Amino acid sequence: MRIDLDVPLRRGAWYRVKKLGPVQVVLDVAGDPVEITRTHLDIVSAPPERWSVVPRPKTPSRFPGVSAYAVCPKCGNRAPLQGRPAVLRCAHCGKVSAVAWNERYFQPPETPDVPGTHP
Ligand SMILES: [Zn+2]
């Protein structure tokens, strides 16, 4: 989600929702629950406008030496990753987007991480 107000949360940052109520939302901010009024948030279910990092190509023979690739947020084009670029330009649609290195949408979760299951 996107934060658009002056609270101890980073604007534009994404936080996991611990509890989604009709008025109040509890966010997981670095492990601490932070309650905030829902109208202040832009809650989205779609991935952000960033390259999603996919750990391994399904067809390694097409990308020799590549251990990961990125998926363009605009057109879905896949680009092999070498090193850890912060920003990538899509060779297909030309869109320049940041690479979501800190997100794990496409990686299998190591532990179940379902909102609301914390004690
Ligand atoms: Zn693209």
Image (cartoon, rainbow, N blue to C red):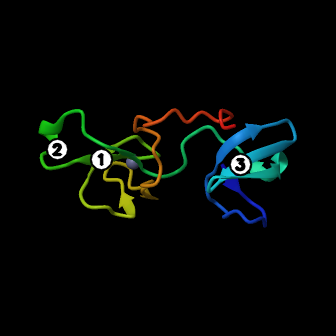
Count the marks. 3
Task: For marks 2 and 1, give the CA distance.
Answer: 9 Å
Q: Residue at x 33, y 63 (%)?
A: 85
> Which dot, 3 or 2, sits closer to the camera?
3
Marked residue nearer the N-terminal end (3 or 2): 3
Marked residue nearer the N-terminal end (3 or 1): 3
Specify the amino acid type for callout 1. Tyr
**Is ligand 1 less than 8 Å from the beta carbon at label 2?**
no
Left or right of residue 108: residue 29: right
* Secondary structure found at label 3: strand
Left or right of residue 1: residue 88: left
Q: Where's the C terminus, which quadrant? A: top right
- The image quadrant of residue 61 is top left
* Labels 2 and 1 touching (C-beta < 8 A): yes
* Secondary structure found at label 2: loop
Q: Residues within 10 Å of mark 2 (few under 14, many from 20)?
A: some
Q: Residue at x 69, y 41 (%)?
A: 18
Q: Which mark is residue 63?
A: 2
* Labels 3 and 2 touching (C-beta < 8 A): no
Task: For marks 3 and 1, give the CA distance.
Answer: 30 Å
Q: Which mark is residue 93?
A: none
Specify the amino acid type for callout 2. Phe
Residue beneath label 1, please?
69
Marked residue nearer the N-terminal end (2 or 1): 2
Specify the amino acid type for callout 3. Leu
Can you give x and y, in whole percent of width and height, for residue 26 in the image? Answer: 76, 46
Residue beneath label 3, please?
27
Q: Residue at x 52, y 51 (%)?
A: 49
